[in-house]
Amino acid sequence: MAETRLAFKAGRAFRRGSTNFVDPDPTKGAILIQNGEDGLLHFIWKNRSTNDAEEDLILFPGDATFAKVEQSAWGRTYVLKFSSSNQRHFFWMQDADPSRDEEFVGNVNRLLADPSIVPIWYSEGYNPNSQTAGPSTSSAPAAGSSQAGQHATPEELARIRSIVSTLGAGGSGGQSFQPTPEISLTDVLTPANLRPLFASRPELAQALFPHLPPDLPSPPTVETLERVVSSPQFRAAVRNLDMALRTGLLGGLVRTLGLPEEAGTGVESFLRALQDQARREEGEGGDRMDTD
Amino acid sequence: MSGEDDSSGWQLTESDPGVFTELLKTLGVPLVVDDLYSLDAEALAELQPLHALIFLFKWVGGESSEPSSGGQYDPEFPGFFAHQVVNNACATLAVMNAIGNIHGLKMGPQLAELLSFTAGMDPQTSGMAITSSDWLREAHNALSPPSAISLEGLDLPKTTEDAYHFIVYIPYAGSVYELDGLKQAPVKHGAFSESGEGWVAKAREVIQARIATYPPGSQVTSEQVEFSLLAVHDDPVPHLQEQLAQLQAAGRQSEAAELVVKLSNENSKRERWAFENSLRKHNYLGFIHALLLNMAKAGRLEAAKEGAKKALQERIERKKKGELMDED
């Protein structure tokens, strides 16, 4: 199975005729560097709307470099150029936050020179979930999560470990490594928040029963729901999901819930995506629940 | 103990009597495990016949390899004794050491085969045989949450209790033995008298001596339980039911009423254990998703997020205050 070494949001740009101008194509995409099943390094451009890999270039070590286009006034245009030919492929960074461009480009070039290297990530003082003001993009790379259901790569695991170890079990490891600390799922799914929900909507209970453990000793009731959401097992599951969301790599998992990949990049992204999903489902008719 | 996390596919389980009892059920063993809050005669009498006592405490490290007071290593111990080879398997290993020496114990065919396979093996090899047993590992793992998120090897802080260390006390050939999977051999604590309370009287002495060696403040109190005791004993329910039938047939109503209460308490406890075990095995991702989605549809998610923001702020403030105080 192909193993993604690196991925980040990027669009393509095409030369305008025979001029020296390149025009960026607005299509949302991503560059993925993968170890293919053929044992070779692949430089892939994927269309993020269709999820199709529209470009798949095999690169031998030292074949190509990924350089900044200095003449670009915008400053975030790059070109993949080859030592063996005149081929040029232009790309532009699509992540709203430019602070990681250098990191990604550095790693692309390291991999192009030597596919066996381990990418270098800025782990100290780095937060993959730093929320920018922009509502529609997150600065988390699509690394790994763009392959639905795929496990994290060894490099990603190493990075997650360094981040998670600073999170600590009770936040006690916390230094000022987060510019904007994220809210915790455990504070959202509290019994205090959930009990009134169950009480005000008895029909909701029926919709939730199928999600309860299937082998309860007696058939579930509203009281069962309350017992479950106060249980240490449920609270531990919420804590685990919270921690996993903070790694920013749950893109593959959240897609199984019908959510977009961005929902797997952090707690707030997850909740926002859920609010979108709720609005969409309400809009599709069927049971309309009155808002409180 | 290796510093590496080599769990070899064994998940960490809770050290709850309901978990142990469920494991025994899976092994086809008709015994029950209960919390012991006291070692006094009355408490123990309730649970007779008692087959083993399991003493658990949080591993503090640095414990000497001297046997605890009054005992001696018995490397010639002919019964079942396995070393703890994988840390996460400690609960199941303790169960094996507790029941591997009960004469005439009913058990399922797989366990019988495993015990006969390991007969005569040295403790290290026994331990490895136990931890390589796929069916046993599956039975063990069935008692803890499934990894809902396929990010194995992540070393996320564990949310189940920290690994407890388990020490088993059993009667064997007229003496009380201490079976500790981390010690080189079983420790023989000396002979017991069959009369009166039997072996548990001697076991009580040994355990109390052990507890006395811990620093003060780590006693078993309701506020600060650093260690606890479990009793492995026969399932009382069939016997209680028989007795009840007899008393009712003989018209001894008030005694029958007492038994009804006992049976009802026992059954409530079992129901609670069954409930907790089913909660332990469950993958909550779908449930969490449905809860949040319905909170959103009910227009309650924004308010919950606001509440979460406040809670976060409060924690940050408290931490800051804590830090300021430290600086003084």
Image (spheres, rainbow, N blue to C red):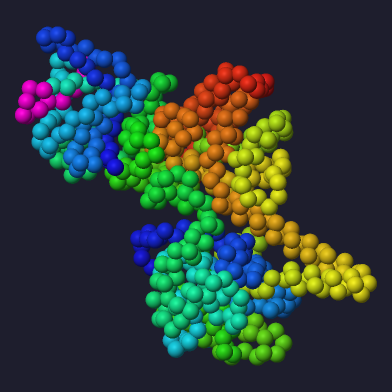
One can see residue B150 in this view: yes
Is A84 above or below relative to B236?
above
Residue at image x 48%, y 30%? Answer: A258
Residue B111: x %, y % from top left = 52, 72
Residue at image x 57%, y 18%? Answer: A283
One can see residue B211 in this view: no
Residue A61: x %, y % from top left = 12, 38
Q: Tell whether A144 sits left or right of A39.
A: right
Residue at image x 36%, y 43%? Answer: A151
Residue B323: x %, y % from top left = 46, 44
Q: Quadrant of residue A195?
A: top right
Task: Out of A265 and B118, give the one closest to the viewer.
Answer: B118
Magenta span of residues: A74-87
Task: Out of B181 and B303, give the one closest to the viewer.
Answer: B181
Q: Quadrant of residue B103?
A: bottom right
Residue at image x 31%, y 23%? Answer: A47
Residue B110: x %, y % from top left = 51, 70
Which quarter of the rendered picture does the C terminus of chain A lie within?
A: top right
Counting every numbered tag in the picture gives 0
Which residue is the extreme one toward the right? B251
Q: Is residue A83 located in the magenta-colored stretch of the structure?
A: yes
Which residue is the extreme one toward the front? B109
Which quarter of the rendered picture does the N terminus of chain A lie within?
A: top left
Q: Tell whether B53 sits left or right of A221.
A: left
Q: Is residue B285 located in the magenta-colored stretch of the structure?
A: no
